[in-house]
Image (tube, rainbow, N blue to C red):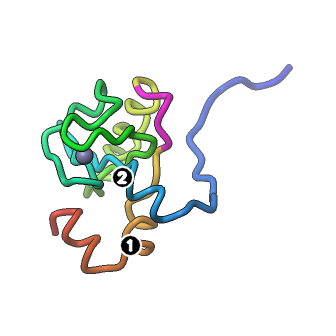
């Protein structure tokens, strides 16, 4: 019999940086920012479209947490509540968008 136990695995995929930037939510503890217009305080469990710029969200990045278990828990919750969003790794985003920009968007 097959083992149906689920686990999280990071899959490498090629994406267009402009496309990701346009439809990206950056999630903090409770709220997220729209990367397209920098609108703040978005409820990432609910909002599918940015109230300010009208872009539809397709990707979500979670700000790095000091605790890896916490980070995985946050990813699991988002995947449960938002199966429509693709969870992207903030480190990869940082690399793709350039360091200073990423530092800015990650609030570092
Ligand atoms: Zn926006």
Residue beneath disc 2 = 68
Of residue 29 and residue 51, the one placed in the foreground of this image is: 51
Are discs 2 and 1 less than 8 Å apart at CB? no
> Farthest right residue?
1
Toward the viewer: 92 or 101?
Answer: 101
Q: Identify the residue under disc 1.
A: 97
Identified at 33% across, 49% down, the residue is: 62
Q: Is residue 45 above or below residue 92?
A: above
Total numbered labels: 2
Magenta stretch: dominant secondary structure: loop
Q: Which image quarter: residue 27?
A: top left
Which quadrant holds residue 15?
bottom right
Front residue of 38/96: it is 38
Residue 62 as seen in the image, left or right of residue 4: left
Q: Residue furthest top?
A: 1
The residues colored magenta run 82-86
């Amino acid at each position: 019999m097959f083992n149906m136990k689920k686990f999280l695995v990071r899959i490498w995929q090629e994406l267009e940086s402009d496309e990701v930037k346009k439809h990206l939510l950056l999630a903090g503890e409770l709220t997220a920012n729209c990367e397209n217009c920098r609108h703040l305080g978005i409820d990432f469990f609910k909002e599918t479209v940015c109230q300010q710029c009208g872009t539809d969200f397709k990707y979500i990045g979670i700000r790095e947490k000091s605790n890896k278990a916490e980070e995985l828990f946050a990813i699991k919750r988002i995947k449960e509540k938002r199966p429509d969003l693709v969870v992207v790794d903030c480190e990869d985003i940082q690399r793709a968008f350039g360091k200073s920009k990423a530092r800015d968007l990650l609030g570092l």
